[in-house]
Image: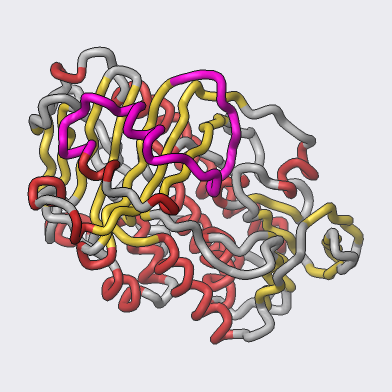
Amino acid sequence: MKEARIIIIGAGMGGLAAALAMQRAGFRVSVHEQAPELGEVGAGLTISPNATHAIEYLGIGKEIAERAVIPERQAMIHYRTGKILVETKRGNKPKEQYGADYYQMHRADLHSALTARVTKNDSAAINLNHSFVGCQESDDGVTAFFNNGDKTNGDVLIGCDGARSAVRSWMFGPEAPKFTGNIAWRGLVPTDGLSKDATALHSAVAIAPRKAFTRYIIRGGTIINYVAFSRKSGWKQEGWSIRSEVSELLEEFDGWHPLVSEIIAGTPPDQCFKWALFDRDPIDEWTKGSVSLLGDAAHPMLPFLGMGAAMALEDGVVLARAFEASGTIEEALKRYERARKERCNFVLLQSRVARERIQGDQPEEYDDNKHKNEESLGLFDYNPGSVAV
C-alpha cells in the first residue's frame, strides 16, 4: 500500500491536511489546485481541541501555538443592551479536560503552516492552475483530467475541492443547493482603533431576531475577525470574495450596541465582504470506486457552529490512518468513510439547528438552559489521531 499514488484535488485546509497526513504515513501525494497561487481568504477561524489534536498529529502544533490566541472568556450577548446572557470560561480548561488547547487564529496562518510542511516534504507536491474536469478509472487506477490539458495518474483520488466540489458533481451529478435565506458579511478590524470595551471579550456572539454577529480576537490581539448574519432575500451570490460597503453593514445592524457597531464602523473599506449562504443535504456515500470526498466536498456545512475547518482537519488525519491500517484502496476508503460519515453529518445537521437557536425571536430569554455549542454537543471529546479506524 505504501506504493499507492494519492491524487488530491484542492489545496485548501482539508486537502493540505490530507496531503501532510499521507506524507507522514509514507505515501506519495500530488495535490492539484485550480488557483494560480496558494493563499487563504482574510478571515479567522476557531480551532477546538478536537482539531488541535489533528494539528498536533500533523506535526505543526508548535507553529500554530505561536500564531494563535487562547481565549479566556467567550460570551453570548444581547444585541441591543450588550448584556452577557451566557458566559463560558476557556483559558487552560480545554487543555485540562480534553488534552488540547482551544485556539482562535487567522486562516492564512494555518494554511501557510500546512503548505510549508507539505512542500518541505516534497517541493513538487502541489500543482497550481489545475482545475479538475473529470477522471477515468481503469485496472491501472485513476486518471484525473484538468482544464489546462494536463492529466495525472494515480491509484486513488480524493476530492477536497470545497462546497461547490467539481469532484462531487462528477461522481454523483450536479445538485441544486438551497438558499438558506441568510446573508453573511465578514471583516477584519485592527484593534488599535477600538475601545477597551469592544475588545474586552476575546470572543462573543451578539444574538437578535433573525440576525447574529460573532467576533473574536486573532493574531495576538491585534485584529478582530467578525462574521455577521442576517435573514433577508433578494441577493443570492455564493462566494468568499464579494466586496461589500461598510455603510451597508452599518445600516443592516443599525441600533445595535456599541460593542457591535463600533467594530463594524472600524472595518477598513477593503476588508468588508459578503456572501449568500446555501445549504446542501448530507449524502449517503462519499466514495465511488477509487474516488472519495473529504471536507466540505463531502459534508458542506453552514458556519453556525464554526466546525467546518475542524471537520476537514479530522478527515485528513483519519484518511491517512485508514490507509496505514489497510491492505487495499477499497478497504482504506471503507474504513475512512465508516469512521467519519456519522460524525460529520451530525455536525452538518446541528449547524442548521444552531442557526435557528442564535437567530431566535426572543434573545432576552436566551440562558444557560437554552445554550448549546460545540462543546455541549460532545464534539470536543474526539481525537482523530487515536479514534478507531
State how many labels appear.
Answer: 0
Residue at far top of view: 361
Tell me: residue 214, above or below residue 388.
Answer: above
Q: Residue at x 49, y 57 (%)?
A: 41
Residue 62 percent location from the top left of the image: 31, 78
Q: Is residue 3 left or right of residue 43?
A: right
In the image, taking residue 266 as reference, residue 319 lies left or right, namely right
Task: Decide which of 139, 10 is in the foreground and name it.
Answer: 10
Is residue 241 shown in magenta?
yes
Q: Position of residue 106 (x, y in %)?
A: 37, 61
* Visual colour scheme: secondary structure
The structure residue drawn at horizontal position 71% and vertical position 44%, both measured from the top left corner, is: 168
Could you say which is closer to the camera, residue 299 or residue 384? 299
Q: Which residues are magenta?
A: 232-261
Image quadrant assignment for residue 103? bottom left
Q: Is residue 110 above or below residue 349?
A: below
Between 277 and 352, the one lying in front of the other is 277
Magenta highlight on residue 348: no
Residue 368 position within the rendered picture, expressed as x and y whole percent measured from the top left = 13, 28
- Horizontally, is 323 left or right of 105 in the view? right
Q: Residue at x 32, y 45 (%)?
A: 226
Image quarter where the N terminus lies is: bottom right
* Residue at 63% over, 85% down: 123
Percent x, y of residue 10: 65, 60
Residue 99 figure quarter: bottom left
227 and 243: which one is in front? 243
Above or below, 116 against 19 in this view is below
In this picture, residue 380 sits left or right of residue 180: left
